[in-house]
């Protein structure tokens, strides 16, 4: 297995690689947590002083991964296999997308 969670020589979608990093509790530098309450803002300020580490999606029991533009059935299958592989009790992963893509949709999108 490579660090993306895919076997050597195989393709792993961006959504699959992101899910793998979330499950493996790696830092995702492109994602930021924006607190909405005063307490959250104060904690964020203290975090900059070294009192608190930055939050990761895996710090929460429920992770929602929604892909604008959609997911193919193969991407969904690969991500479900990744979730099964992790075997983390108490974690809930919600996968979603704006559409479930068929192979024809992918071909039309590439050659449009």
Image (cartoon, rainbow, N blue to C red):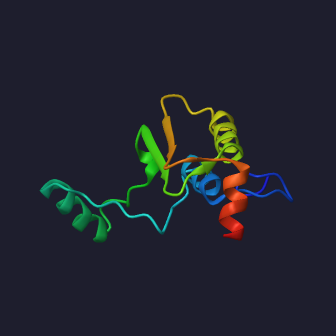
- 22 shown above or below 91: below
Residue 45's image quarter? bottom left
The residue sitting at 48% across, 39% down in the picture is: 94
Task: Provide residue 63's location: percent of width, then percent of height.
Answer: 45, 43
Question: Could you tell me how many numbered marks the image carries?
Answer: 0
In the rendered structure, the answer to whether residue 92 lies left or right of residue 11 reads left
Task: Provide residue 39's location: percent of width, then percent of height.
Answer: 16, 54
The residue sitting at 73% across, 50% down in the picture is: 103
Viewer-proximal residue among 70 and 2: 70
Location of the C terminus by quadrant is bottom right
The residue sitting at 72% across, 56% down in the picture is: 12
In the rendered structure, the answer to whether residue 97 lies left or right of residue 52 reads right
Residue 83's image quarter? top right
Task: Provide residue 43's location: percent of width, then percent of height.
Answer: 23, 59
Task: Provide residue 10's location: percent of width, then percent of height.
Answer: 82, 56
Q: Residue furthest right?
A: 9
Viewer-proximal residue among 78 and 73: 73
- 104 shown above or below 93: below
- 41 shown above or below 98: below
């Amino acid at each position: 297995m490579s660090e993306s969670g895919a076997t050597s020589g195989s393709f792993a979608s961006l959504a699959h690689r992101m899910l793998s990093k979330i499950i493996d509790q790696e830092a995702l530098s492109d994602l930021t947590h924006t607190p909405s309450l005063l307490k959250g803002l104060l904690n964020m300020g203290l975090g900059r002083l070294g009192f608190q580490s930055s939050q990761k999606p895996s710090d929460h029991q429920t992770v929602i991964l929604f892909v604008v533009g959609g997911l193919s059935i193969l991407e969904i299958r690969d991500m479900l296999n990744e979730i099964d592989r992790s075997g983390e009790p108490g974690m809930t992963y919600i996968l979603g997308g704006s559409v479930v893509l068929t192979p024809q949709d992918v071909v039309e999108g590439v050659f449009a």
